[in-house]
C-alpha cells in the first residue's frame, strides 16, 4: 500500500515544519495532490491519522486538493485537460505532449497552535 509510505513522508515534512515554527500542535494540513499520482485520499488520510498518533500532529485534519491532469501539445502548443489517461492532443492528435500539472505531491500549508 503505497499511500502508507507517502503518508509517512508527509508526516515527516509536517513535523519538521511544525518544529521549525515552534508549534505545539498541528490542527490541519493542506495537501496538493496531482491526479497522476493516483493516490486515494481516503487511504492517505487513514495512513496519516494512524502514523500521527502520539505526535503533535495527532488528530490533525487533512484537507486534500486534487490537481487535475493538464497536458501541453509540443506540436500545436495548446493546453488541454487529459481525460482517462489519454495522452493524445485533442486538437491535432499528436502524441508528443508534455504533462504541465497533475504530478504534484506537496504540503501547501499547516494550521498550527
Ligand atoms: Zn496538438
Image: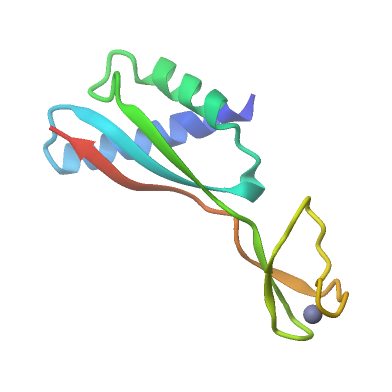
Give how far across and how far down residue 104 sits, in percent. 53, 53
Residue 4 shows up from this direction: no
90 relative to 74, above or below:
above
94 relative to 4, above or below:
below
Q: Quadrant of residue 28?
A: top left
User: Residue at left 11%, top 37%?
Assistant: 22
User: Residue at left 29%, top 19%?
Assistant: 58
User: Residue at left 30%, top 25%?
Assistant: 60
Dividing the image into four equal quarters, which quarter contains ligand 1?
A: bottom right
Give how far across and how far down residue 66 sits, in percent. 53, 46
Quadrant, the C terminus: top left
Residue 7 shows up from this direction: yes
Q: Quadrant of residue 75?
A: bottom right
Name the foreground residue: 80 vs 113: 80
Is 111 positioned to the left or the right of 33 in the image? left
29 relative to 36, above or below:
above
Is 23 positioned to the left or the right of 70 in the image? left
Name the foreground residue: 101 vs 14: 101
Give how far across and how far down residue 43 sits, in percent. 56, 24
Is 112 positioned to the left or the right of 29 in the image? left
User: Residue at left 60%, top 56%?
Assistant: 102
Is 78 positioned to the left or the right of 88 in the image? left
Quadrant, the N terminus: top right
Residue extending farthest bottom:
76
Q: Quadrant of residue 88?
A: bottom right
Instruction: Give the number of marks.
Output: 0
Residue extending farthest front:
91
**How is colour applied across the structure in the image?**
rainbow
Give how far across and how far down residue 63 sits, in percent. 39, 36
Amino acid at each position: 500500500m503505497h499511500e502508507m509510505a507517502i503518508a509517512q513522508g508527509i508526516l515527516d515534512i509536517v513535523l519538521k515544519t511544525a518544529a521549525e515554527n515552534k508549534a505545539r500542535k498541528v490542527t490541519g494540513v493542506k495537501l496538493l495532490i496531482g491526479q497522476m499520482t493516483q493516490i486515494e485520499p481516503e487511504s492517505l488520510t487513514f495512513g496519516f491519522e494512524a502514523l500521527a498518533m502520539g505526535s503533535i500532529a495527532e488528530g490533525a485534519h487533512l484537507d486534500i486538493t486534487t490537481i487535475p491532469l493538464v497536458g501541453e501539445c509540443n506540436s500545436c502548443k495548446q493546453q488541454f485537460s487529459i481525460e482517462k489517461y489519454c495522452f493524445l492532443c485533442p486538437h491535432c492528435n499528436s502524441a508528443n505532449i508534455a504533462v504541465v500539472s497533475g504530478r504534484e505531491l506537496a504540503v501547501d500549508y499547516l494550521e498550527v497552535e
